[in-house]
Amino acid sequence: MQKKIQKLADQFKTLGNPIRISILLCLLNGQSNVTKIQNCLNIPQSTVSKHLGILKNSGVIEGERNGLEVIYTITDEAIKNMLLSFIKD
C-alpha cells in the first residue's frame, strides 16, 4: 500500500505545475512534437523541452523518434481520464 501512496504522491508532484498540465491538455488532442506544443502554449521551446522531460521521466508521456523529431503521447490512462473529466466541466 505504501508504494501505491508514494506513486500517487509522485504523480501529484508531476501535475503540480501549470505548464505541465497545459502540455498534457495539448496532448489530449493527439500526438505532438515540441514545435506544435510550443505553438499551442506560446512559450519558449526550452521550457517545453524541460517539462516534457519531467513528464517523460515520470511515465506520464512517452516520446517516439520519427526522423529528427520526437512525437509525444500521453501513456498514463488514469491521468488522461482525469484531464478529460476536467475539461468536460
Image (spheres, helix red, strand yellow):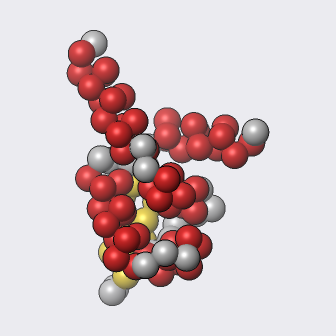
For the N terminus, the quadrant is top left
Whether residue 83 sits left or right of residue 46 in the image: it is: right
Measured as percent of width and height from the top left, residue 2 is found at 24, 15
Whether residue 42 sits left or right of residue 5 in the image: it is: right
Judged from this view, the residue extending furthest toward the right is 89
Query: Relative to 27, does residue 78 appear above or below in the rendering?
Result: above
Q: Residue at x 49, y 53 (%)?
A: 18
Quarter assignment of residue 70: bottom left
Residue 66 makes an appearance in the image: no
Judged from this view, the residue extending furthest toward the bottom is 68
Query: Relative to 32, does residue 11 appear above or below in the rendering?
Result: above
Query: Relative to 83, does residue 57 appear above or below in the rendering?
Result: below
Q: Residue at x 33, y 86 (%)?
A: 68
| Near-viewer residue (47 or 75) | 47
Whether residue 84 sits left or right of residue 48 in the image: it is: right
Q: Residue at x 52, y 66 (%)?
A: 31
Query: Relative to 3, does residue 84 appear above or below in the rendering?
Result: below
Q: Residue at x 42, y 43 (%)?
A: 16
* Count of marks placed on residues: 0
Whether residue 87 sits left or right of residue 24 in the image: it is: right
Measured as percent of width and height from the top left, residue 22 is found at 54, 58
Residue 46 makes an appearance in the image: yes
Measured as percent of width and height from the top left, residue 17 is found at 43, 50
Measured as percent of width and height from the top left, residue 84 is found at 64, 43
For the C terminus, the quadrant is top right
